[in-house]
Image (tube, coloured by chain):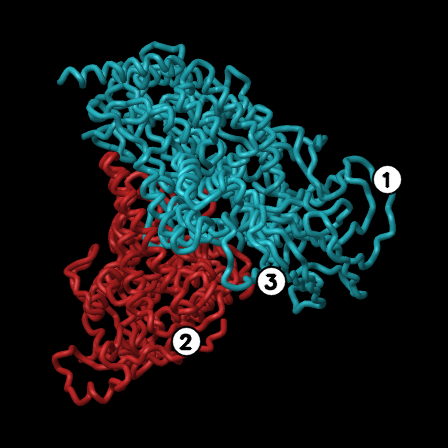
Amino acid sequence: MSVSVQRLLAAAILGLAALATLAPYLSAEAKRPDPQFTARYCMACHSHAARTAGVSLEGLDTAEVSLQPAVWEKVLRKVETGEMPPPDMPAPEPGERAAFSRTLEGALDAAAAANPDPGRPPAHRLNRAEYANAVRDLLDLELDVASMLPVDDSGYGFDNIADVLSLTPALLDRYMFAARRVSRLAVGAPLAKPQKDIFVRNRETGFREQGHARASFGDLPLGAGRGVALRYRFPRTGEYLIALALDQGDSREAYKHEETRVSVDGGLRTLAFAFPRESSRPERAGPAASSAVPRPHPPLDVRLDGRRLHLVELPEAARPYSIRRISIEGPFADRGPGDTPSRRRIFSCRPSSPSDAGACAERILSKLARRAYRRPVTGADLGPLLAVYESGRSAGGFDRGIERALRALLVSPGFLFRTEDDPEGARPGSPYQVSDIELASRLSFFLWSSLPDEELLAAAQRGDLRKPGRLERQVRRMLADSRASALVENFAGQWLELRKVSKVKPDEILFPEFDADLRYAMRRETELVFEDILRNNRSVLELLDSDRTFLNERLARHYGIDSVHGSQFREVRLSDPRRGGLLGQGSVLAVTSYPNRTSVVIRGKWVLENLFGMPPPPPPPDIPELEEAAARDAKLTLRELMTLHSRSPTCASCHVRMDPIGFALENFDAIGRWRDTEGEAAIDASGELPGGMEFDGPAGLKRVLSTQLRKRFVQTVAEKLLTYALGRGLEYYDRATVRMIARQAEQSGYGLADMIVTVTEAMPFQMRRLPQS
Amino acid sequence: MILTGKSLSRRAALRGMGLSVSLPFLDAMVPAMAAPRVRASEPALRMGFVYVPNGVMDLKGEWTPQGEGTDFEFSEIGQGLAPYRRHLTFLSGLAQLNGRPGADGAGDHARAGATFLTGARPVKTEGLGIRAGVSADQIAARALEEHTQFGSLETGIEEPSVAGGCDSGYSCAYTNTISWRSPTTPNPVEDNPRRLFERLFGDGDSTDAAERLAKLREQRTILDFVRRDLARLKSELGAEDRRKLDEYAESIRDLERRIAKAEDQSGKDLPVVERPGGVPDSFTAHAKLMIDLQVLAFQADLTRVTTFMMGREGTWRSYPGIGVPDAHHAVTHHSHDKAKIAKVILINKHHVEMFAYMLEKMRGTADGDGTLLDHSMLVYGSSISDGNQHLHHDLPIVLAGGGGGRLRGGRHLRYPRETPMNNLLLSLLDLGGVPTESLGDSTGRLEGLTRA
């Protein structure tokens, strides 16, 4: 080994020590796990001869868990959760089980600390959400990214997994297309001819996912009962034709058309089409102050950025009007790009004379490139960008040059891929600390799904991120920023499957009330609950059970709560212990149901998998619902026929956990409404989980889950956070980190923000492994 | 969609290889005006692969035709294809055995999607080390892409899963697509008609040929920049990252090739078509629109290879429009419940109707001396037969199209049980002029497809 390599190695080890990230890995217990435990309870099946499920524990020594950490991690998991030994085999007493788990955990933690492996995710392509956020932060431009890029493939439950994010010609095509459109929009390039955009009410989501940026109900004028807000990017200053078609909620050909010609400044504007309130109850929790006589056909109020354009009187009709289609066409009489936020962001200088242009372009592009590449830029970065600029400038002037350089920047691999450089000369396979600049990107993509801002990048450049307390300060600052809502959208959206709420299709005949507003409200409730826990560092246990939630009138009525009025969401204290926590929320209850009925099994599986990290293996083919069907003919109740699961040991080993959870939630129908009966039969929501955990109904279930399975839940939150933060699947060598995060959480009151801080301080977030050879 | 279409460049059609062609025939077929650039040649052969998820009901012969050879009767589900009898062959007995669990356990839907056109055993992973095999459509695409702007199109009518796992520890990529560009690079499926349109015809600020060309040239300067940038970045990276970025480099080459091709063909008239809006609400409207666009791409010779997924493998999609408000996957696990079986059949028939629409559309589109249907080979089917038991043999497969006059339709052929479906894929590649030695688990060629 050469001297320089030795020095580098020493530096790497010092780096480790200086980080002090490994101390929290050591749990208190440092005793050898009972060497006879596996012989007593495991070896009947897991011997060399039997090798059940391909696992043999024969010849493995509990004194040397560091020799087979992968196998021992599996043993720990199965023993700790009680999944092993199976129901029909001799099992240890609870005390013996706990002691073995504790000591094995200690031994594995020590082994992990002695030989840290941070893993090695490959280059990350930005996924769709990250691309949109990066463009927003780079150019002050919000995108309707769904019209530009396809949904990404996912793995391990998330779509930011480096191994799965591949690039194909079809996708590069989309990136080229997006880059052209984005750069033109950002500089406000002239259009060859007026464009026409048409937005049609979607059956599932109304207009909520339309327009060029997300609109909120707050964009509707005060006092609006119903209506549509649409954020639209007017490409240039000029005149536009805004046309609407109305129907009576039935998608039949429009009953009424309206057209308005209006002069608009270029940029993102809010168009609001509001039907004034049909009742005048105040928007607050509490009893209704008065009940005014509803107006049968209030006129339609059309506004641009709050300013009234038009009040459309509507003819008499049997049912209320709805907006069916909105089209916007223009610009006519183009009067230039307008003074948009994007232009202000980009054009940090204007050339005062042709001789200035080059210097100004260089200034603009170095600023943009620094941000886009997420690192200090060099002459080698700028040269090629300036060449592209020049080709555009000579063809069409300064703005055109900048536009073209921007377009190149947006498809540059340095922008589209997150890469990390390996240090030279270090031992293959050894861990190293990623650079501060790389750490900044890890942070911003974890917390914001976007680029680092200047403050973070500058801190990294100064070498500030790893000084005591600085990382935590940055993380807390970033969590307080509005961009941290990316964690709600992308992390919670996938972990809790909230993104699926806009895809579920409840049977229209059985559930006619399930409309776009209710769908939106369900998703919004869980998002707001999660965001509240995140921003206020509340305990993650509130996800399991809580006496608070966020509701608007629509959802409150759905839940049978009649004290909430108006379309705005607000915090509501729940007096009924059945609704609080994820398991009483419409979003979760709907995504775990079939279109036309609930499913005990799917709900049980969802809870075990997403909340407790204990995914039951899928059923063997041909078995599923066999008994159910047979029993249906015999007119057994659902409960009676599901008990058939316990007759077969194969079925029982998993259903003994899934079914009781699902049954406890049977009082919630397929769209999350409370019910006491199904058809004729009263619902029996009592049950028992292995280990003597008895309960009745959702409130009882939640109590059991949040006490008896608390540790598993907190570890699962840690697993999900770490997977998402690293953008890779977790391996056996990550288990010790997961336990460390969960232990820290236990000590600090389970605050979600605290857990996130711990994740960013953890060894695999700070480090990367060199390739093996 | 409105087609005010001008006719496409006229293509002279010949059977057999260039050698056996007699010159007078050639002269007769090539319009004098079109010389000298247009050279008469064999009509381009198009290949399409249409996938239906969750298997097809065949407990009591709902799918498999009665009788064999030319003397067969359409089954209940196949009935919708009766008008195209002359143009199709039902193939029974084929299998994708790598779809079976083997040592990998659960995950039949993931393995179904991954094996359909690869015949390879997919690696059971959520991400790390993701791998299936190159798919037959991509082998064809690489060989045929020199003729067209797009080597292939991968289309579907269902978005990738937006949250949650897909199948038992397999990455969603395995259920999202049937097309694999390389064993490690799944091709994403385009489900949005507007995005597909824009990919094919540009974003439509102008249809002016000169401006389109100027736009393409602009793209070229950008790609030059990206290529240099990539080389610079790659020199700084480790080997695995470099491999990841190789995908990027390959995509750039593909785009450059396409631009060159587009310049080459810039004199060619493209059909004038109205740009579709977003994704239609109804399954039928969506499916038909995606089919229209594929047929258009064939017609304009923008590509010769397509895949089309009627749904993600394992899909939960419900079909309230045809009286099936239930999740598709849930009813396929029917456990012999009559009501569920009836619903599966309704879905299967509905999918067949969509395929019939595609055949109708292609039969109605003139191409050279015949129709697009004459000059194509279309495979319709699933990599699961019985969705209840997740079986991967006796697959429901039908081959349609005239194959440029070489496929002999109007038959039901039965092959020995568990004949690799990849033998069919190899035979089609042979016919398409892309002879390939072996593919996945192939053991040879499928006999009896062509005219003697």
Amino acid at the residue labelled 2:
Lys
Pointer 2 with pointer 3, Cβ within 8 A: no
User: Which residue bears the numbered disc 2?
Assistant: B361
Q: Nearer the viewer, residue A496 or A450?
A: A450
Q: Colour of chain A?
A: cyan
Category of crowding for the residue at label 3, using alpha-carbon neighbours closer than 10 angstroms: few (below 14), some (14–19), many (at least 20): some
Q: Position of residue A9 (x, y in %)?
A: 23, 17
Residue drawn at point x = 38 percent, y = 74 percent: B359
Amino acid at the residue labelled 3:
Phe
User: Which residue bears the numbered disc 3?
Assistant: A332
* In the rendered image, the vertical position of residue A293 relative to residue A523, given as above or below: below
* In the rendered image, the vertical position of residue B161 relative to residue B445, given as above or below: above
Q: CA distance from mark 1 to mark 3?
A: 49 Å
* In the rendered image, the vertical position of residue A678 relative to residue A21, given as above or below: below
Mark 1: secondary structure: loop
What letter labels the chain drawn in red?
Answer: B
Disc nearest the viewer among 2 and 3: 3
Residue drawn at point x = 33 percent, y = 76 percent: B373
Asked if badges 1 and 2 are on one and the same chain, I answer no
Taking the image as shown, residue A419 lies to the left or right of residue A134, namely left
Pointer 1 with pointer 3, Cβ within 8 A: no
Category of crowding for the residue at label 2, using alpha-carbon neighbours closer than 10 angstroms: few (below 14), some (14–19), many (at least 20): some
Residue drawn at point x = 47 percent, y = 43 percent: A351
Mark 2: secondary structure: helix
The answer to whether residue A605 is visible is no
Q: Earlier in the sequence, mark 1 or mark 3?
A: 1
Q: Position of residue B31 (x, y in %)?
A: 27, 86
User: Which residue bears the numbered disc 1?
Assistant: A289
Q: CA distance from mark 2 to mark 3?
A: 39 Å
Q: How many marks?
A: 3
The answer to whether residue B307 is visible is yes
Q: CA distance from mark 1 to mark 2?
A: 62 Å
